[in-house]
Image (spheres, rainbow, N blue to C red):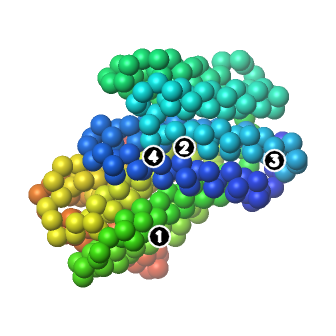
């Protein structure tokens, strides 16, 4: 079991929490793309933006992990936060024109250079070819994309850059095994990001509702949306967080948990929550209308991805997802497929009821000391 050379603090520092405030704005900016342009292209661009910002946040979190909360670390977080702030400001127009995409890509490149240098000084890796150096290359691709005309070619470069960054820890998994991780600080940091993404659903629906004249059906949708947020919170924090912390403490190779469960798995959770926020806002604005187009699918699709994220992480932690969460995820995908045929509030009722039923079932299983039914999948590699 790998222990950190020095776990400087068990909880997030105040400087880290200040840095997280930038991420609140960044997630909101990415979520606004499909709100203003309700089509699958905008949804895809929002996911790409979230991926870049998420990977940057992960990079900063791992760079300061196990480091004393000193003035030097605080200034590092402040500079990293400024880079993220610039990225967040320019995010809505990161795919159009040239000047704004170049500012976004330049800020991202500066951030990745800071992170690469921080990990080099930290001597976290034994080889120069590691996830941080590869992600530095992917940041250069985003700079190149800014000089390519808007459209398919630019989007293709973005996709290649994101895939390159995300593939590096899996392809170069041996380099991660040399890194040392604590079992208290990291789970809290990633849980805080889940809170940020959950907060986006509250802020998005609240902002939309505050600008509208609400009828009875809209108020019902608002109450259901808040209940859905509570249910999603319960899925993570009632049982999921403890399982992640336990896995990180007991896994022989903690780097695997950090890579698969925290870095990859939580990205799926965050994307799911953002899609829920966009879909819920559309429902509150037009609760009784048939939600044609992309808005008819996003609410259930986001909830399905969120639950599916737990299936993936539990498989990577313990070898098998639970039947309850697997069946719920599959059912929500079915609801997402037919969502464009239903009034928005009907979809919201079904999704909220499904999440509540899953929480109720899991509470019953745990409170009666019954074993969780598991889905047997191929063994973890």
Mark 4 against mark 2, which lies toward the viewer? 2
* Mark 1 vs 3: CB contact within 8 A: no
Q: CA distance from mark 1 to mark 3?
A: 33 Å
Q: To which residue does mark 4 refer? A: 30
Q: Position of residue 21 (x, y in %)?
A: 63, 55
- Label 4 element class: helix
Q: CA distance from mark 4 to mark 1?
A: 25 Å
Q: To which residue does mark 3 refer? A: 74
* Mark 4 vs 1: CB contact within 8 A: no
Relative height, residue 176 to residue 254 (above, below)? above
Q: Position of residue 153 (x, y in %)?
A: 35, 19
Q: To which residue does mark 2 refer? A: 89
Mark 2 against mark 3, which lies toward the viewer? 2
Q: CA distance from mark 2 to mark 3?
A: 22 Å
* Mark 2 vs 1: CB contact within 8 A: no
Residue at horizontal 57%, vertical 39%? 87
Q: In the image, is 303 to the left or to the right of 100?
A: left
- Label 1 element class: helix
Relative height, residue 122 to residue 369 (above, below)? above
User: Which of the marked residues, 4 or 2, is nearer the chain's N terminus?
Assistant: 4
Residue at horizontal 75%, vertical 22%? 126
Q: CA distance from mark 2 to mark 1?
A: 32 Å
């Amino acid at each position: 079991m790998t222990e950190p050379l020095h776990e400087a603090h068990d909880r997030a520092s105040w400087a880290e929490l200040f840095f997280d405030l930038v991420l609140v704005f960044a997630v909101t900016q990415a979520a606004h793309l499909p709100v203003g342009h309700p089509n699958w292209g905008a949804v895809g661009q929002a996911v790409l933006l979230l991926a870049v910002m998420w990977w940057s946040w992960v990079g900063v979190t791992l760079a300061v992990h196990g480091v004393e909360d000193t003035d030097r670390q605080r200034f590092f977080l402040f500079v990293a936060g400024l880079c993220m702030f610039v990225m967040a400001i320019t995010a809505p127009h990161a795919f159009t024109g040239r000047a704004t995409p170049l500012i976004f890509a330049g800020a991202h490149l500066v951030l990745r250079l800071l992170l690469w240098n921080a990990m080099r000084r930290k001597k976290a890796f034994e080889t120069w070819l590691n996830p941080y150096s590869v992600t530095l290359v992917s940041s250069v691709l985003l700079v190149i994309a800014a000089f390519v005309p808007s459209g398919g070619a630019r989007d293709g470069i973005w996709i290649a850059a994101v895939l390159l960054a995300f593939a590096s820890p899996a392809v170069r998994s041996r380099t991660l095994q040399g890194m040392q991780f604590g079992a208290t600080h990291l789970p809290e940091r990633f849980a805080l990001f889940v809170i940020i993404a959950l907060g986006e659903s509250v802020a998005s629906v609240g902002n939309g509702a505050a600008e509208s004249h609400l009828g009875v059906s809209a108020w019902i949708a608002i109450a259901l949306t808040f209940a859905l947020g509570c249910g999603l919170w319960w899925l993570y924090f009632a049982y999921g967080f403890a399982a992640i912390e336990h896995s990180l403490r007991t896994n022989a190779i903690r780097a695997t948990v950090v890579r698969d469960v925290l870095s990859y798995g939580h990205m799926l959770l965050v994307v799911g929550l953002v899609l829920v926020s966009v879909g819920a806002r559309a429902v509150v604005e037009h609760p009784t209308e048939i939600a044609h187009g992309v808005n008819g699918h996003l609410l259930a699709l986001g909830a399905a991805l969120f639950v599916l994220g737990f299936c993936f992480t539990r498989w990577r932690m313990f070898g098998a997802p639970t039947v309850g969460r697997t069946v719920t995820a599959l059912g929500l995908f079915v609801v997402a497929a037919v969502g464009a045929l239903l009034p928005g509030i009907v979809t919201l009722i079904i999704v909220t009821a499904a999440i509540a039923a899953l929480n109720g079932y899991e509470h019953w299983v745990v409170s009666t000391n019954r074993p969780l039914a598991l889905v047997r999948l191929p063994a973890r590699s």
